[in-house]
Amino acid sequence: MSIVESLEESAKANNYKGIDKVWLEIGPFSGVEVRALEFSFDVAIRGSIAEGAELEIIETQAGAWCFSCDEAVVIEQRYDPCPKCGGHQLTVTGGEELKIKQISIKE
Ligand SMILES: [Zn+2]
């Protein structure tokens, strides 16, 4: 699991003793099931620098830019029409995140 790998890498680079807590940002279009991720995180951190770390998931909102309205809108699904004008002139601007937002280091 690449998240745990990047935790280990930054831990090594910065000489962390351990990791207390991890905040993960997940967008609705990231293709990640939050519950499945929580479960696999617990398994993946066993024996790693992040063993015992708490996981907090921040679910981000999906956003898009509507060229017809010329403004940012919020969408539920990737191919949803614009909620304001019903048009499809949208480009997705957020919601694909799957990244470590913050970590808390053991003293
Ligand atoms: Zn629109």
Image: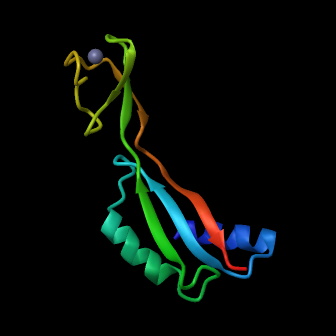
Q: Is residue 65 above or below residue 76?
A: above
Whether 96 is drawn above or below 39: the answer is: above
Residue 22's x, y, as percent? Answer: 55, 68
Q: How many marks?
A: 0
Where on the picture, by quarter, is residue 8? bottom right
Rendering coords of residue 49 (x, y %): 65, 81
Farthest-out residue, front: 107
91 in relation to 23, above or below:
above
- Residue in view at x 34 percent, y 48 percent: 28
Q: Where is residue 29 drawn, in percent x and y?
A: 35, 46
Q: Quadrant of the C terminus?
A: bottom right
Q: Residue furthest bottom?
A: 47
Q: Is residue 38 left or right of residue 10?
A: left
**In the image, is 76 to the left or to the right of 92?**
left
Farthest residue to the left: give it. 86
Q: Nearer the viewer, residue 23 or 76?
A: 23
Q: Ligand 1, what quadrant?
A: top left
Residue at (31% x, 17% y) in the render: 89
Q: Quadrant of residue 90?
A: top left
Quarter of the view holding residue 51: bottom right
